[in-house]
Amino acid sequence: MKKLVVLSGAGMSAESGLKTFRDMGGLWEQYKVTEVASPEGWERDPALVLRFYNERRRQLLQASPNAGHYGLVDLEKHYDVQIITQNIDDLHERAGSSKVLHLHGELRKARSTVDPSLVYEIEGAELNLGDLCEKGSQLRPHVVWFGEPVPAMNEAIGIVQQADIFVIIGTSLNVYPAAGLVMYTRPECRIFLIDPADVKVPANREFVHIREKASVGVAKLKELLIP
């Protein structure tokens, strides 16, 4: 069975009602990214950061996977599908995808501020000051903030290097190091890009651009890939 690797970004979840960072003009709601998605912001005002992610979590709990998510699940009947997502939502999993690697963390999880290996599921939407890990330290969102390393990057590179087909969905390829993953594809790997906008792909890579939003684009991808 051929290996199909998907790199999904914010456009994948936009049709589920989750706003994308680029659509917000560099702001999430009324917040600057440096206030709510950086180690410095956390040090300065952890209560604000927790409140911001609680709001995102409430939105996520009200959202549902869209046709694009379900279409990728359908492809598992024909391919060994591995999803690498830049998104911190769990819509791929809720749709039924069996292999999902989160590059930038997971919104519905928290982790210790003294031991990053201690990761916990968040019950409901709330994570607050005073919520502690088993070692007695404050819990923080299990999210990779700007300026922090991406622990899952090496695993993602290994997956991409095995791909027979590489599909990029709903990402501007402007956020590194994730944007560089396409450079690890083998020369014979077929590359598809699903995005209504122009996306800068390395010039030495041939690709098929499906200029549609995720739901329509995945449906067209299925027509191309399923006999």
Image: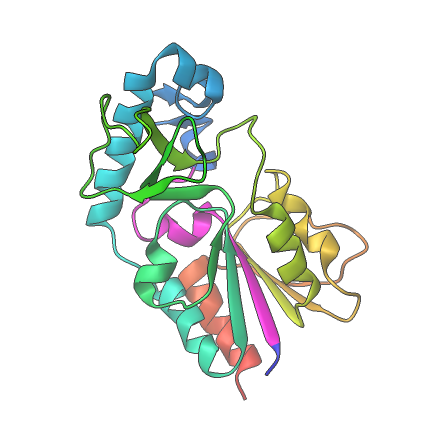
Tell whether position 6 is magenta: yes
Q: Which quarter shows the N terminus?
A: bottom right
Q: Quadrant of residue 52?
A: top left
In-image side of 42 versus 199 (left or right): left
Q: Position of residue 66 (x, y in %)?
A: 32, 61
In-image side of 211 versus 87 (left or right): right
Rendered residue at 35%/29% (across/down): 140
Q: Position of residue 132 (x, y in %)?
A: 27, 28
For the record, the magenta segment spans 3-20
Rendered residue at 59%/38% (across/down): 175
Image: 201 above or below 226 = above
Image: 102 above or below 118 = below
Q: Position of residue 86 (x, y in %)?
A: 50, 46
Tell whether position 72 is magenta: no
Q: Which quarter shows the C terminus?
A: bottom right
Rendered residue at 66%/54% (across/down): 157
Q: Quadrant of residue 190?
A: bottom right
Rendered residue at 56%/78% (across/down): 224
Image: 43 above or below 144 = above
